[in-house]
Image: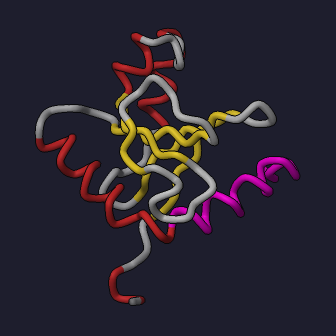
Amino acid sequence: MKYQNSPKMNKFLGEVSSDFIKVHEKLEEASYEMMKRGFKYPVFILSKNKLDIPLMIDKHEVNNLWFYHISYLKLLIDNKLISKEKESHFKENYKNPEQHCCLLILDPEFSGIVFMPYPDEDEN
């Protein structure tokens, strides 16, 4: 079965992709450091407004559309951003964090999780 993204999702993926290319190295390093310290399932939360979650990248610093907040699965469950019932589904679908960045997009028009592949270093 082939899935198609909704037009809203495509709009957000375009915005996120253009931002992501500017910050992917910082996100990849932060993900590695989190896992090294025992935090499983790193997640970066994207929002157009600051949240009460640790801010990693201010959108004004890099001329982006999104703020990037740093988190991980357990914290998202504890704060009820992901329900406990969805934990196993999340873990089953979580992609290799050495190759993909887990992004939770929070916006009034669209909220969802996407996995963005880190650019291949050989392509640069």
Look at the picture and state if 55 lies above or below 31.
Answer: above
Instruction: Examine the structure image and report whether residue 5 is included in the region drawn in magenta.
Output: yes
For residue 105, what is the image quadrant?
Answer: top right
The residue depicted at 70 percent of the width and 35 percent of the height is 107
Which residues make up the magenta segment?
A: 1-20
Instruction: Examine the structure image and report whether residue 95 is included in the region drawn in magenta.
Output: no
The residue depicted at 52 percent of the width and 53 percent of the height is 59
Q: Percent x, y for residue 99?
A: 37, 61
**How many tags in the picture?**
0
Q: Main secondary structure of the magenta part?
A: helix
The residue depicted at 47 percent of the width and 45 percent of the height is 68
Look at the picture and state if 4 lies above or below 69.
Answer: below
Q: Percent x, y for residue 80?
A: 51, 11
59 or 104, which lies in front? 59
Residue at far right of view: 7
For residue 48, what is the image quadrant?
Answer: top right
Q: Percent x, y for residue 55?
A: 39, 38
Look at the picture and state if 98 lies above or below 77.
Answer: below
In the image, taking residue 90 as reference, residue 47 lies left or right, namely right
**Whether residue 49 can be seen here:** yes
Q: Percent x, y for residue 46?
A: 55, 42
Residue at far front of view: 60
Name the colouring of the figure.
Answer: secondary structure
The residue depicted at 36 percent of the width and 45 percent of the height is 56
Query: For the C terminus, which image quadrant?
Result: bottom left
**Whether residue 1 can be seen here:** no
Look at the picture and state if 105 lies above or below 19.
Answer: above
